[in-house]
Image (cartoon, helix red, strand yellow):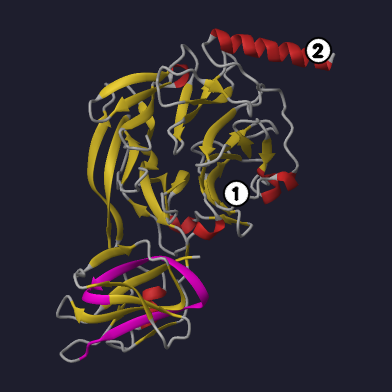
Amino acid sequence: MKMKNLVAGMMAGIALNLCAGVASATCISNPAAQPDASFPASLTGKLVYHSYVSYGDGTSQIFLYDFSAHALTQLSNASWGIKDPMNAVFSPDGKWITFMGVTNNAWNVFMYQLGTNNAPINLTNSTGATRNEDPKFSPDGKTIVFKQNGSVMQATLSYTSAGPVFTSVVALATAPSGGEYSMPYLSPDESAVYYATGTGANMGLMKLTIATGVTAVFDHPASLETYYPIVRADGNVFYARWKDSSALDQIYEKTADPSSTPNQLSLNDCISNNSDPGPVNGTNYLFFSSTTAGGYQLYLGDVNSGQRWSLTQFGVNADTTKAKLGSSYYGGPAASQVSLLSQGHPAAASASYNASLTPDKAFDGNLTTTRWDSPEGAGVDPQWISVDLGAVKNISSIDLYWDAGASVYQIQTSNDNVNWTTLYSTSNGVSYGHVNLPNLNGHGRYVRMYGTKRATQWGYSLDEMQVWGS
């Protein structure tokens, strides 16, 4: 009898979705999770998500699971002073997350640098009833798109010695009075933005071509709520949609062509909610939330086969009183997983201006109130500052937060603190501010900034020097 009912239910689901113009559904009721031991070993990256009892109740916190380190960490804490931080996503280089949360009685957009002790930076600084929500990095990491009071905005990022700031904000899609545009996500080439329009059962997806301003309906079936578009690096769009009038969320996939047919994924549970897709670029895997086991829990699914793995084995789903939602994955081979290597490690310098401006201050995680200064005056160059990473590491990039800069300097590495190899050199350095040195592709236990000409009348002064790698 159970098998007969299951088959009948599957046939009914297929018929309903064919009538709605959807590719044939292969969801099943209460799908079994795959064995823990078969969880894909290729996923060695990091997953960020939020957890709360119910939306807006003040219980939301942001968590990170590191698959390489097998470590679950709560990122948000009371010292942030942010109520209900949620919907975090990684920057393209994996160094930052952007998320939304409440301060000064308003929803604001924040950025937080992973691996540091720095507080998140409030990028929108709104008060009162203003709502800044749903932030997502552009594929090149130079802008953030987000919803502001019902309209889709795009903000240009600039990095200063005090952290990132918005230098310009433009409206990509302005909602009419009483309207609501939300959950924006840029296409891989940044030529278009997808977003949800409307609320509740009237919510559908639109695609706006930015250069022309032309908007096309991407998927907007009548009376079936459709929302939360996420775009994979190949351009395919994943999103959640009610499968029928039962109001149960299912995850769908479409190509970038608005006229293409939506595909209801086989990893869906037909009789549960399945939402918040988080695709893994370059694979068929997708992180998502599902109520198969009761409240929302996190799963990994294979888009092609429909196989599902619960993340319970990693401790992610341990607190069954809270929903786990908004997953975002930063991945790639284990060797490409960059981490902040230098913070809190032993530091040295050729000299310091005084006993309070010592080299350790450039590696303490504080970007604004502590720093290292070299001596001032004539005849004191060259000067250097170095950090001991504790072992030979792969060096991929360095961030220099200059209070007073160097016009001519080198970045050097050493395995023995005696013989040095130059990774980077410039004769056109800045006087102050943040400088990012990407794609260094070096290695060493010791890393130093070796300055030979100052850019100001002061000594070399670094608020912070961050060494990134693996």
Q: Secondary structure at mark 1?
A: loop
Inspect the magenta stretch and tell me whether residue 392 lies in it: yes
Task: Give the camera-side residue of 113 and 108.
Answer: 113
- Overall secondary structure of the magenta stretch? strand
Q: Secondary structure at mark 2?
A: helix
Q: Amino acid at mark 2?
A: Lys
Give the residue displayed 31% in from the left and 49% down from the top. Answer: 123
Which range of residues does the magenta coloring cover?
A: 380-409
Q: Residue furthest bottom?
A: 379
Q: Nearer the viewer, mark 2 or mark 1?
A: 1
User: Disc 1 marks which residue?
Assistant: 43
The 10 Å Cα crowd at callout 1, few under 14, some 14 to 19, many 20 or more, is: many
Image location (x, y in percent) of residue 292: 68, 30
User: Disc 2 marks which residue?
Assistant: 4
Q: Determine the image quadrant of residue 243.
A: top right
Image location (x, y in percent) of residue 306: 65, 30
Image location (x, y in percent) of residue 60: 52, 44
Q: Is residue 254 above or below residue 336?
A: above
Q: Is residue 248 above or below residue 38?
A: above
Quarter occupied by the N terminus: top right
